[in-house]
Image (cartoon, helix red, strand yellow):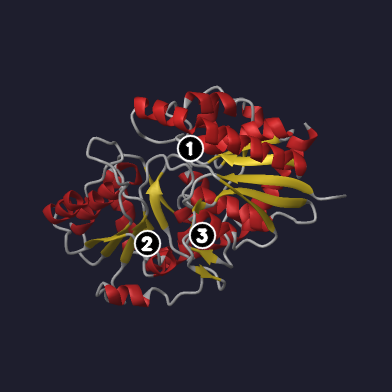
Amino acid sequence: MSAVNVMFVQSQTFFGADSGQHALIMRYLDRDRWRVHVACNAGEPGKPSASLEAVQRIPDVVIRHLDFRTGFGSRSSRLVKVVESIRQTPRLATTILRLARYVRRERIRIVHATEKPRDVLVGYAAARLGGARCVVHVHVKAETWINRLVRMVMKRCELIAISEFVADSLAGLGYDRDRTHVVLNGIDTGRWDDQLGGVSEQGWDDEDGGAAVRAEFGVSPVTPVLACVGRLNQWKGQLDLVKALAAVNDTTSEFFALIAGEPDHVGPDDPRYFDVPAAVQLADDLGVGANVVFTGYRRDVPSLIAACDIYAMPSFEEPFGMVYLEAMVLRKPVISLNNGGTPEVVLHGITGLLAPPGDVDALAANIVELLDDEPKRRRLGEAGRARVETEFTASRLAADIAAVYEGVLQS
C-alpha cells in the first residue's frame, strides 16, 4: 500500500503550543502509511520564520514555502480589517491557487489546519480546489469570537478537539458531535524543544534538578518552591495564585514562588491586559512580596519546573494545559482548577489537587496540604510521570490522529 499524502498548514510565523502539537504529529506519523507535507509561512526575505526553523528540524517532511501575509485574524478595528482584507485579496487568491495546484499535483488527500482564520480559510479553499479533505484541529474553547466566516467553513470540515471540554464547546456552537474527534495532546518525553530553537535530544530529564535556578534566585535547597509558567493574563490565574499564597502565608512563610511569563502586548482596554507592576504591588500589599517573584519570559522551562516542588497554575477554563504535562513529566504534583480541560489531564488526588474555580481559600488549602506533606508530593509526582508515559505520549498522539485520517478517507 502506497503512502497517503497529508499536508499541514502553518500560516503563522510564530511557533506556539498548537504548532508544537502539529510538529509532534508530523514527526511521529508512520512514514510507511503517511507522507507528510507542510505549507509553511517562510517569513521575510533573509529572515526565516520561527515556524519554518522548527519545521526544518523534523525529518522526512516536504516543506512548501508560501506567502501567508494576509489580514485575517488581526485584532484591529473592523474598518482596518476590511481595508486590509481588500488590499490582501490578490495575494491571498494567488496563495490559495498555488497551494491548490500543489495539493492536486502531489495528490494530497488530507489538509490539516488549526482553527486560526488563515489556516482554516486557506487550508479549506486549497483542499476543496485541489480535491482533498480538510481537517481542522481546534486548540481553544470555541466561542462566538471566532470569525463568522471561519465558523461557517469549519462546519464543512472534520474537527479534532484537544479535549472533551473543547468538543463540548464546539457542540454548543452547533457543530456535529459525530464529526468532532477528541484527541488529547501529547508530549515527547525523550526530546525537549522550547519552540524557539533550544532543543535537547536528552529529553525532559536533561536538567540539573533545578539547582541553577534556585541559586539564581537565592532559594535554599530545602525551601519548598512553587512554579507557575505561562502567558500572564487574568485567565491563567496568576493573581488568584498570589491571593492564595497570602492565605498560605498565614500558616507558613516557608515557601517561594516563581511566576514566569510575559503579558500580551496590548493596551489597558484590552481584556487580555495584565499589569505586571500592579501584580507585584499586590504581592507586596498582601505581605508575600518577599516570597513571590515575577521572573518575566523564560526559555529554560524544564529547569524552572525542575526547580519547584509544586507546579501551581489555577488557569480558568484551560482548553488542555500542556504545561501540566510538562510538570508531570518532571514528576511534579499539579495544583489547578476543576474546570475546562484540566480534569482530563490532572487527576484530583492522584496526580494533583484541583480547587473549584473562584475559590481562593480552597486553592490555598491545597497548597498548604502539599507544602506540609513531602511524601504526598512525591507520590503525586510519580503518578503524574506514569500517567504521561501511558496516556500522553507523542506516539499515541500520532496514532490517534492517524485513526482520524483513516476515518476521513473512508467516509
Of callouts 3 and 1, which one flags the residue occurring earlier in the amino acid sequence?
Answer: 1
Of callouts 3 and 2, which one flags the residue occurring earlier in the amino acid sequence?
Answer: 2
Classify mark 2: helix, strand or loop: strand
Identify whether 226 is placed above or below 243: below
Q: Residue 66 in the image: x percent, y percent?
A: 58, 46
Q: Is residue 79 visible?
A: yes
Q: What residue sits 35% from the left and 77% below the top?
A: 212
The disc at residue 384 is 3
Task: Indicate left or right for 395 with 5 as reference.
Answer: left
The disc at residue 310 is 2
Q: Residues within 10 Å of mark 1 (few under 14, many from 20)?
A: some
Of callouts 1 and 2, which one flags the residue occurring earlier in the amino acid sequence?
Answer: 1
Q: Residue 100 in the image: x percent, y percent?
A: 68, 37
> How far apart are the alpha carbons under marks 3 and 2?
12 Å
Task: Indicate left or right for 100 with 18 as reference.
Answer: right
Residue tagged by mark 1? 70
The one nearer the camera, 282 or 353, is: 282
Classify mark 1: helix, strand or loop: loop
> How far apart are the alpha carbons under marks 1 and 2?
42 Å
Q: Residues within 10 Å of mark 3 (few under 14, many from 20)?
A: many
The answer to whether mark 3 and mark 1 are in CB contact below 8 A is no
Q: Residues within 10 Å of mark 2 (few under 14, many from 20)?
A: many
**Amino acid under label 1?**
Thr
The one nearer the camera, 288 or 90, is: 90
Q: What residue sits 40% from the left and 64% below the top?
A: 299
